[in-house]
Image (cartoon, grey):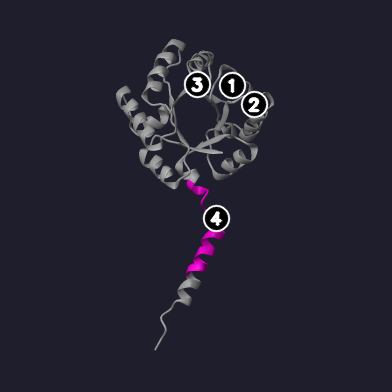
């Protein structure tokens, strides 16, 4: 399963890249705003910086909601870097835009997926990725993992090459469940990725190893 980081923070992206586990980045307007990145020129420059750090898939989201405007904005984003994946919302105009970009050979990530039917429409239109939002479904007492499983099954049944990108991943068990189900990608904040490092038995085991080493290597009293 690929690991993407869901952020626009360059320091977090660099840290994840240095860990050696990063396969890509997802961003959205909210994440850009969180970092204080405003204005079209600044946003485009920031996307370019992200691409230079990771050298792999970077989902860059369109702001427009109308088909013609999505096309214009998506074309501009795609021209920035070969690693840009144009992120398109799951709407009627969005599905049309995905079809347009697919025919041009521009990769897309269909975002704000909350049902298997939405994922199926996006895949039929030629989306490179679909992004079902696990955590937001959990928030309304719906099993986000069940949706991931449905989509994986449907895509496998019919041989769709669209990758299932689990989004709104909030804790390590989300990551493990996605891997068990067979999601192609998961995207999460750096804190969730780093949380996978932690286990109390690892901590206690390491402390014992170090204590034993120190005891065995005490200076010999003369």
Q: Secondary structure at mark 1?
A: helix
Question: Which badge, 4 or 1, is on the more N-terminal residue?
Answer: 1
State the residue at coordinates (45%, 15%): 65
On the image, the x and y values in percent for residue 37 come to 33, 30
Secondary structure under the numbered disc 3 in the rendered image: strand
Residue of label 3: 89
Residue pointed to by mark 1? 123
Q: How many marks?
A: 4
The spot of residue 148 in percent (x, y) is 62, 32
**How many residues crowd around disc 2 within 10 Å: few (fewer than 14), some, or many (20 or more)?**
some
Is residue 142 visible to us here?
Answer: no
- The residue furthest top is 68
Q: Which residues are magenta?
A: 194-210
Q: Determine the image quadrant of residue 77.
A: top left
Q: Secondary structure at mark 2?
A: helix
Residue pointed to by mark 2: 155
Q: Tell which circle, 3 or 4, labels the residue nearer the N-terminal end.
A: 3
Residue at 54% from the left image edge and 64% from the top image edge: 205
How far is mark 4 from mark 2, CA to CA? 34 Å
Q: CA distance from mark 1 to mark 3?
A: 13 Å
Q: Which mark is residue 199?
A: 4
Label 2 to label 1: alpha-carbon separation: 8 Å
Quarter location, residue 52: top left
**How much space separates mark 3 and mark 2, taking CA atoms?**
20 Å
Dot placed on the residue nearer the N-terminal end, 4 or 2: 2
**Residue 14, how many percent across, how many down?**
38, 42
Q: Is residue 166 above or below residue 197?
A: above
């Amino acid at each position: 399963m690929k690991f993407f980081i869901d952020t626009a923070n360059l320091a977090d992206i660099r840290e994840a890249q240095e860990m050696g586990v990063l396969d890509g980045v997802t961003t959205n307007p909210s994440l850009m705003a969180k970092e204080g990145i405003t204005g079209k020129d600044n946003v485009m420059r920031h996307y370019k910086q992200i691409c230079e750090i990771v050298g792999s898939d970077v989902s860059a989201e369109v702001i427009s909601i109308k088909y013609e405007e999505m096309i214009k904005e998506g074309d501009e984003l795609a021209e920035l870097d070969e690693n840009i994946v144009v992120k398109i919302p799951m709407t009627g105009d969005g599905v049309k835009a995905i079809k347009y970009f697919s025919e041009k050979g521009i990769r897309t990530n269909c975002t704000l997926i909350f049902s298997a039917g939405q994922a199926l429409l996006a895949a039929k239109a030629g989306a490179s990725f679909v992004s079902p939002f696990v955590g937001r479904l959990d928030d309304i007492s719906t099993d986000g993992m069940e949706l991931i499983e449905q989509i994986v099954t449907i895509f496998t049944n019919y041989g769709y090459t669209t990758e299932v990108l689990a989004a709104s991943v909030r804790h390590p068990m989300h990551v493990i469940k996605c891997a068990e189900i067979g999601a192609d990608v998961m995207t999460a904040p750096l804190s969730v990725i780093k949380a996978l490092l932690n286990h109390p038995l690892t901590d206690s085991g390491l402390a014992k190893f170090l204590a034993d080493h120190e005891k065995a290597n005490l200076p010999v009293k003369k």
